[in-house]
Amino acid sequence: MRVQSLIDRPPALPRARSLGAGASLATTDLHVAVRAFRLEAHVEEAVAGGAVSSEEAVACFETLAAADRVAAFAAQVSGHLVSGTKLVGW
């Protein structure tokens, strides 16, 4: 299944906004979401693993594309990295 065939050619990928020690990417553009979140690869893995059928995956992307056409699509992912050191004696 090729997700790219369900949508138009994607625009250039924007950079994530930095929020201090974390990062967030929000978009209302399906083309950006497909590239930024690697949706095609994840869907293909889900189909290969038997989590969803190819028909279900295509139907899902058709629903997302329909929402994008009427400006009703939105996606966001946020992350925060925490690191430290272990104190001696703990």
Image (cartoon, rainbow, N blue to C red):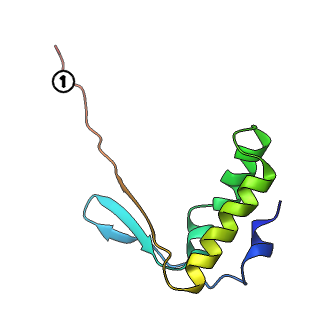
| Left or right of 61 on screen, residue 54 | right
Going by the picture, which residue comes out furthest to the right?
A: 1
Question: Which amino acid, mark 1?
Answer: Leu
**Residue carrying label 1:** 87
| Quadrant holding the C terminus | top left
Residue 69: % across, % down: 60, 85
Closer-to-camera residue (23/68): 68
Query: Which residue is at a point 76% across and 74% down the rendered structure image?
Result: 6
**Residue 25 falls in which quadrant of the image?**
bottom left
Query: Which residue is at a point 75% across and 67% down the rendered structure image?
Result: 3
In the displayed structure, 44 sits above or below 67; it is: above
The answer to whether one can see residue 77 in this image is yes
The secondary element bearing badge 1 is classed as loop
Residue 20: % across, % down: 25, 64
In the displayed structure, 7 sits above or below 60; it is: below
Query: Which residue is at a point 72% across and 78% down the rendered structure image?
Result: 7
Residue 66: % across, % down: 62, 78
Query: Which residue is at a point 75% across and 38% down the rendered structure image?
Result: 50
In the displayed structure, 63 sits above or below 22; it is: below
| Left or right of 12 on screen, residue 21 | left
Within 10 Å of the Cα at label 1, are there few (<14), some (14-19), or many (20+) other Cα atoms?
few
Numbered marks: total: 1
Closer-to-camera residue (14/68): 68
The answer to whether one can see residue 35 in this image is no
| Quadrant holding the N terminus | bottom right
Residue 15: % across, % down: 47, 75
**Residue 58 falls in which quadrant of the image?**
bottom right
